[in-house]
Structures are given as structure tokens and as C-alpha cells.
Amino acid sequence: MSMSPTLATFIESKHIPVHLLHHKPTETSFDSATTCHLAMKSMVKGVVLEDELGFMMAALPADSRLDLDQVRRYTGRKLNIADEYQLVDLFRDCEIGAIPALGQAYGMTTLWDEQLAFSAKYFIEAGDHENLLELSHIDFMELMKTMPHGQISLIH
């Protein structure tokens, strides 16, 4: 697989050009960025959250960790990190551990970290452990323009 069909359909529906960066297999977004010699601030990881209202995704730089308390303050929800077994059902066309940080492609709101506003390029897992979706600043902002944002992460 090179890109999950759900992600491909979403990107095409937004008329965003598809650019994939192929790399040797890696396990995490952080490892993908290291392998491809990318700036950590441009590698976007997704963290799936849940509560009684449903699922939401947080998108943040790969070198940051999610500030769950801040997410709860921004959303007014009692969100927790979703269990990995739930991700299998939510992201059926993705490999475990390689979910794209564009929750809206999968029908969920994506709360993105404001640190991401300052990158020229963005790299997102494409649904497998060997490909990254490369987005320009303009294209990333276009995809996120209706999504909420805030300071939701802490740099490691």
C-alpha cells in the first residue's frame, strides 16, 4: 500500500496535489522524520482521543507530546487517548501505528497544534510504514481551515 484509499479520496476531493515520500520501514512518525532527514516540526503525528461524545484527533509536531489537560480546556470535553484496538476499526485501511494525522478524512474533527502554523512543508503518515504524504503550507492550511486549533502540545 502507498496511501490509504480513504486518505487518497479525501485529498483528491479537496483538489490537493498528492506527493508521496517513500522511505525504509519505520515504526513511528518520529522515526520516519529521522529516516527521511526531515525537520521534526514539519512531521505531523496524529493522536486519537475519545469521550462519551465520540472520537477526535489531535495533530501535533512529531517532537512534541500532547498536553491532554490543555486539549480538555480547549474543547470542554473529558477526552482521553483512545485504545489502540479502537484504532483498528477506525482506520481499517491503515497499518497499525501509521494513521494519517488528518482525522477529518475519517469523519472526525482534528484539533491541530498552533506550532504547526510555522512550517513551510508538512509530512504525514500515509497509512503505511513506508510512505509519507507531503503537503505545502498552503495545502495544509487549506485542509485545516475549518478545524479548531490551539496550543495543545509540549516540546520534548
Image (cartoon, helix red, strand yellow):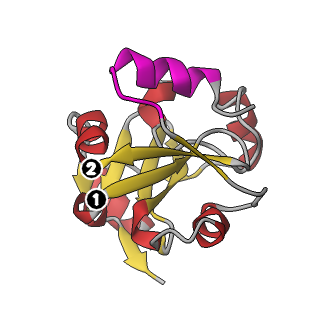
Judged by its main secondary structure, the magenta piece is helix
Residue at image location 50% in from the left, 42% down from the top: 51
Mark 1 nearby-residue class (10 Å; few <14, some 14–19, many ≥20): few
Q: Position of residue 96 (x, y in %)?
A: 76, 45
Task: Kindly identify which residue carries mark 1.
Answer: 120
Residue at image location 46% in from the left, 46% down from the top: 134
Q: Nearer the viewer, residue 108 or 96?
A: 96
Q: Position of residue 18 (x, y in %)?
A: 46, 31
Q: Earlier in the sequence, mark 1 or mark 2?
A: 1
Q: Residue lying at the far bottom in this picture: please name it.
A: 156
Q: Are marks 1 and 2 in contact (CB under 8 Å)?
A: yes
Tell me the kind of residue under disc 1. Answer: Ala
Q: CA distance from mark 1 to mark 2?
A: 5 Å
Residue at image location 35% in from the left, 59% down from the top: 71
Q: Is 56 in the magenta?
A: no
Q: Position of residue 16 (x, y in %)?
A: 35, 28
Tell me the kind of residue under disc 2. Answer: His
Q: Nearer the viewer, residue 11 or 51?
A: 11
Q: Nearer the viewer, residue 99 or 79?
A: 99
Task: Kindly identify which residue carries mark 2.
Answer: 137
Q: Is 9 in the magenta?
A: yes
* Magenta-colored span: 5-18
Residue 84 visible in the displayed image:
yes
What secondary structure is marked by label 2?
helix
Q: Is residue 147 left or right of residue 36?
A: left
Task: Give the position of the N terminus as an image quadrant.
Answer: top right
Q: Is residue 106 left or right of residue 98?
A: left
Residue at image location 61% in from the left, 61% down from the top: 29
**Which quadrant holds residue 15?**
top left
Q: Position of residue 27 (x, y in %)?
A: 75, 60
